[in-house]
Image (spheres, rainbow, N blue to C red):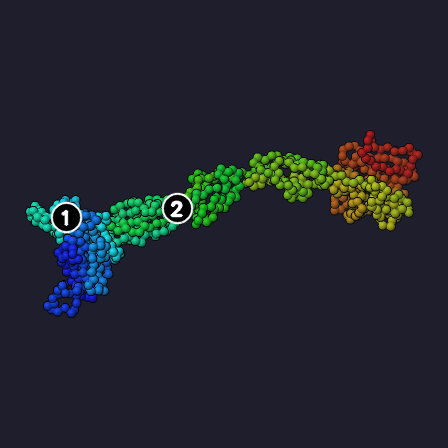
Amino acid sequence: MNGDGMDDLVLSAVFADPLGRDKAGLVALVLGSDSFSPNQVIDLNVFTPAAWLVGGAANDRIGFALECGDLNGDSLDDIVVGAHLTAATAGAEAGRCSVVYGNRVIPPGTTIDFISPSAGNINFLGAHAGDRLGYSLACGDFNGDGIDDLMMGAIYLDPPGGEWAGGVFAVYGSDAFDPHLVWDFAGSDPDLLIYGDEALEQAGMSVSAAELNGDGLDDCLVGAFQHSSDTGGDWCGALYGIYGCMEASAPSDPDPASSAVGVPLEVTLGWTTGAEADTFDLFFGTVNPPPPYQAGLTDSFFDLPATVSGQHYYWRVVASNECSSTSSPVWDFTTCIVPAVPGTPDPANGTSGTALDVMLDWSDSVGEVSYNLYFGPSSSPGLWAGGLAGSDYQLPTLDEGVQYHWRVEAVNGCGTTLSAEWNFTTCVSPGIPVLVFPPDGAVDLATAITIYWNEVPGADSYNVYFGDSSPPPPHTAGLTDPLLQLEDLADGVTFHWQVEAVNSCGAVASEIFSFSTIWTPVQMLATGPGPDEGNPPLVRVFDPEEIPVVVNEWNAYGVEKFGVNVAAGDLGWDRLDELVTGAGPGEVFGPHVRGWNVDGGTAAAIPQVSYFAYGTLKYGVNVACGDVDGDGIDEIVTGAGPGEIFFAHVRGWNYDGVVVSSIPGVSWFAYDDLTHGSRVGCADVDGDLIDEILTCPGPGEENIAQVRGWNFDGLELDPIEAINFPAYDEDVVRGGNVTGGSFRD
């Protein structure tokens, strides 16, 4: 009892009358000692034991049963005393068993008075009046936990077997007992209760512990001295043996770990337990404590049906065998949250006219999520791209006019969610715009016009390209109507234009058309001095609206005199007239013809238009301009100067922008043998839009003003019979000058 390595002695006197209590009983503890003599006599009248245990009431009979064992696991034996006649809360003779823990220091003469229900360290009280708990006692390690357990006989217990069938109350030892524990079996069951088999057999009359089957566990032996049997007869007695049974250890190591979060929805619960467990009862639910869920499991795991996303669950496991049931703590876990269903598709579901370059987009799901994209031109599309990190995807260029179907699957460790199936239809390119007005090549258009084209099916807008170069530059974008007002255009300019029809599928361009605005040049006057020997070849240009202001002037032939002859004509397709000069009739001046570009206040010689129309002849040259061959460009017509020996030689000249060349067929003598040259002019006198050549003799003394007209068809020159007349009476001599124009009749 005191851990000194020597056994101690516990003695009882059940009929002792301590403290005046009739037959209350008395128990003495005598500690073993190496000083005892071989014939030692201990007289308790004079010997002071280590401790006295005193019955608490008359007739308790404390010590009727005695036992020793280490019930609290402190490696010291404890004293167990039975007082089977003690009254308890259940009634008279319910019985009482008391435990006094061993102690390494026990002062001699210690007295423990059981008048108090809590005297000693543990007190077990009978369950019913008359049970007589404590009639017999036995200690042994029945559950294999290394701590002795206690069996207490109650011979008059009335179990289901019948009246006075008797029974045994067993309590497992523990190192967690309260130091002053009162265990009242009237309200709290023992760890194990063994019932007698039949009425009156008084099982528990004797109990004992022994290792009978070699499993290392003490077994329970229960005597029933009044048991009757067919073979033995009445009251032949019986001895019941109950094998020890290792207590099932509490399950541990939960899987998922307690308080785990983000647990997948398909959960297999798992736990660890000792080999002594035979079955498991699972308690599981969303409240604490969890309710029963599945009983009688034989495996230490359980596959739950699908759980709810983001739910907090509680669970515990009770391990059981034939002799015990032990519960784990309550564990808990929280399931993962499945990703939100992808939504908000872009392009929106059912969209049409979608561009061919498509970036798919959808709403984000919270957390660590990846996406699988299903896409194709038919319903229930197959997997297109998996494991996408973001909530968008750039598709390759799609086909026109196709309905595509798509859906998105959000994936995380908890599972997957699949969106609804969406669709969109790609655009169809617009048709080619047809330019309507102005038609290609139109000329002489106003400087403010409206250009228009056909309305193109499928076009959302139009872009116009316009300018004076080809291809034209961008001008106006995003027009919704098939027309554009153009204003303040430069006159006399050729413009180019093109239209693009635009929708989400792209842009389709028309042909390039051109048109020219009407030319409205400033009309100028050009003059040259007459043929006086002192007159310089000074050309002057006047603006009719600012006369007499000279806009420009220059000497066409340097220091030459005798004035200068002038004519104007469009020699170069620019719809601007150039000025043509001919040297004055000085007797030393050759037939020098020159061309000039006149631009307001400046004049520039045309290098290629500088030639002598009649070789080495003198007396200058007469000039005129007109489109005599119908090619749209004016030609130069010259007449020989007024030399006395010069005939009326007329020639035509063509300037192609590079060189001046004589026109074959336009070189003749207009008046046979007349001399003093010829005056020339050009005019469309027959209305065929081609100028005819007009001539009049030079200033010979006998020359009358005989006007003649000449037509050139591009190959031959023919006189015009209707234009061959003297312009004045015959007394008017020295020739004449001639020209033509459009006048009112």
Quadrant including the N terminus: bottom left
Q: Is residue 185 left or right of residue 629?
A: left
Mark 2 near mark 1, Cβ–Cβ under 8 Å? Answer: no
Name the residue type under label 2. Answer: Gly
Residue at numbered disc 1: 156
Q: Depth check: 693 or 253 in front? A: 253
Q: Depth check: 682 or 285 in front? A: 285
Q: How far from the left and from the top, in percent, is residue 191? A: 22, 51
Q: Residue furthest front?
A: 20
Q: How far from the left and from the top, in percent, is residue 235? A: 8, 48
Q: Secondary structure at mark 1?
A: loop
Q: How far from the left and from the top, in percent, is residue 99? A: 20, 57
Q: Is residue 410 above or below residue 716?
A: below
Determine crowd level at label 1: few under 14, some 14-19, many 20+ residues with C-alpha closer than 10 A: many
Residue at numbered disc 2: 310
Q: Secondary structure at mark 2?
A: loop
Q: Quadrant of residue 173?
A: bottom left
Q: Gap between marks 2 and 1, in whole Å? A: 58 Å
